[in-house]
Every structure is written in structure tokens, then in C-alpha cells.
Image (cartoon, rainbow, N blue to C red):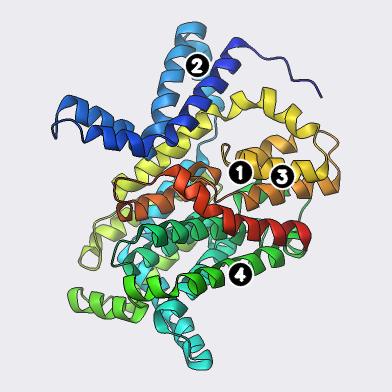
Amino acid sequence: MPLMSYTTIELLGTIFFALAVIHTFLVGRIIEWSHHYPKNSFASNILHLLGELEVVFAIWAALFMAVYISREGWGPAIAYQNSLNFVEPFFIFVIMVVCSTRPVLTAARQAILFVSLGVQKIIRTPPVVTDIFVVLVLGSLSGSFITEPAAMTVTAFMLNSMLQKESNKLIYALIAVLFVNVSIGGALTHFAAPPILMVANKWNWDLMYVFTHFGWKSALAVVINSFLLVLIFRRELTANCITLRDVETKLSGAQAAIPLGVTLIHLFFLSGIIVTGHHQNAFLGIFLLFLGVATVTKSYQDSLRLKESLLVSMFLGGIIQFGAFQKWWLIPLLGQMTDIVLFKGAVGLTAITDNAALTYLGSQVEGLSDASKYALVAGALAGGGLTIIANAPNAAGYSILAHKFPGGIKPLNLLIAAIAPTVVAIVCLWML
């Protein structure tokens, strides 16, 4: 299928998007360059800003919009902005703030600990290794019910509290498995994983279809990835992590006990936000009410993660700015692939194009067979852990764990670390 006709501004949109992707792979080097200049000097501050992964796409999107305005004028630029859907960035901002509150994290941690203690009692496995395994499995699979951004936020915070010492090899392996597991862990249902949500209605995929075609395979891959991680890194985990019980003991000695009523109120608001997650005005209204509750219960709160959540939201908003300008080359490319090539292509393309955007654009291709539809979505799910931009919740996970990476995360190292868990996902989703 030949390429669609394109305008100059569409071509420029693709070029700026490609520059932003390249920039993400250079953030580590840019941070290193910033250290060559005096601290707080203009050059140091500029390079440090350019080395912050969360602002990369926002910077390039702003530059592109400046070009857009200069070529097309204010009217078309505003019309384009109005045509964009920013529900997902707003939702991730809200869900990150709510899920990072002390009552929600404490409830999640205690639930995971209860399950982990049961596993330890039955199988008699080491506490730290068991805790990490259960966190990665249950935390990731919970994304099928509480949405992937919420699952990523809660799971990343639990891992963050358990990691006590820096281990470069371990942290890359851990975050790679986390990203891959969350990407595929939301595939048990048809309403939680963005790549499936984008196509479920159009292709008439219901809960049973999604679970029988994607769900059980994804769950198996999550278990295998988590098991292989704790098996290979059991010594590093024991040396560098503490148990969830130790986390509970440490926090209970420094923080006031949270009344059950406060926890239930937080979970009630969280449930309301999740249920209305596709309706921006509704969940933003609930969130504003929640901010009032957080103020009233401030003695049981840590500082709300507003800044970090806004940065993640800005990162995703920047990606959305470029989405519409990739149709001219992406839709024809997907339309001419065979099923196996489409699956492999979706895995690779997801690394540079958010998997939800990829499946949405693929749904615009007319005449896709059922096998091709499966290949597209399965590939998008499997490749969701290869880069920060491959799956929207990855940015939230990185924001929480970023301080564990001295000098910032190196996207190439993440890509290499994610190959093994991605291969497991590929085998389960394609060969089973």
C-alpha cells in the first residue's frame, strides 16, 4: 500500500517527533554534560532541563507548535489543539496523586503483604524474594481492574520503599520487568489496558474475548517474568532490599496510624475516579473534592506528588501533540503487513510510538482480518516495556523510581534490559 498523501506540516510533525524520540536516548549524556559547568550556571541549568526525560516531548511539541503557528496561523493551530484528546494525561495526573497518598499506599501494601505471608507459609520461600514476586505479579495484574496507571503507581511506590541500596544491574532489570508486566497485565479485561480499550468497541471485543485471547497468556507471562527476575537476582534482592514487613515496621514507627475510616474514604474517591476514568470532567470534579479531603486528613498524609504527576502528564501530552501527524506513514505501513510481520512490526513500533496510539491508528485500517487485529494488539502489548514512551503508565513508574538511577535513566540500557521479559511476552502472546 503506497504512502498516503501528506502536507508539509504533517511531514514536519513527523520530523519533530523523530527528533524528540532521539532526544530521549540522549538524556543521560546531556545530564553528564551539565556537570561540566559550574553548578547553577546558565549552561548547567539549561542542560539539566534538557536532560529531564519528562520534559523532552513537551519541549519539542512547543517548538513544533511555534512552527505550526508561523506557517498556518493562530486559527488552524487552535483548531488543531481543540481536536486533541488529553483525557489520558489528565487521568494519569489525577490517579498518580491519589494513589501516592499514604492511606492508599498503606492499604495496598498491607494487602500485598497478607498474600505474600501466605505464600511464604505454604511454600517457605525467602521473605524478600517472595515479597518482590508477589508485588510484581499482583501489582501488575491489578491493572486489569484498577487501570494500568493506578497499578503502575502503586507497584512502583512499593518497589521504591523496598529498594534500600543502589544496584545498577538490579534496578534496570526490575524496572524493565515492571514496565513489561504492567503493559501486558492489563489485558485480562477489555476496559483497563489503553491498547485494548482503543479498539474494543470498534471491533466488538467483550470481556470473554479479551480474556480468552489475551488475558490468560498475559497472566502467564507476568508470572514467568516475575519468577525469572527473583530467581536470577535473588542474591541482589536479598542484599539490596527490605521486606514489606520491614517497610511496615519502619513507617509505623515514624507515622501516625491511619484510621480505617480515612482509608475507606480514600478508596471511595479512588474508585470514583477509576469508574469515571474516561470522562474528564467527572474525574476532575471528584479529584477537586478529594483535594479537600486530603487537606482535612493532612495529619495522615505525606506531601501530595503534584509536581511529579504534572511532569508525567506533560510528557504524555507532548506525545499526543504529535500523534495525528504520524497517520500518513503509519496507517499504510500497518495495512501492508502480513500477520506475523504485523506482530513483529507492532512490537518494534511500540518502542517509538505509544502502544495505545499504535492500536488506535491500526484500527483506522479498513479490512483487517481477525488474525491481523490480534497480531497488532498483541504486538503492542508485548512491546510496551521497551522504552519510556512505549506505554503511557511507564512515565509514571519512571517518575517514582527515577532517583534510583544515578545520573538519570539511560534509555538504551532500559531497552537492553527489557529484551528478555519482552521475549517472554512475545512467546506467550504469539506462540500459545
Type of the residue with mark 1: Asn
Reply above or below: 23 against 221.
above
Marks 1 and 4: which is nearer the front?
4
Type of the residue with mark 4: Ile
The disc, 2 or 1, on the residue closer to the chain's N-terminal end is 2
The disc, 3 or 2, on the residue closer to the chain's N-terminal end is 2
Residue 355's label in the rendered image is 1
At which x and y percent is residue 46?
Answer: 25, 27
Residue bearing the label numbered 4: 224
The disc, 2 or 4, on the residue closer to the chain's N-terminal end is 2
Type of the residue with mark 2: Ala
Residue bearing the label numbered 2: 77
Q: Secondary structure at mark 3?
A: helix
Image quadrant where one finds the C terminus? bottom right
Q: Residue at x 75, y 56 (%)?
A: 430
Q: Residue at x 52, y 33 (%)?
A: 320
At which x and y percent is residue 169?
Answer: 40, 59
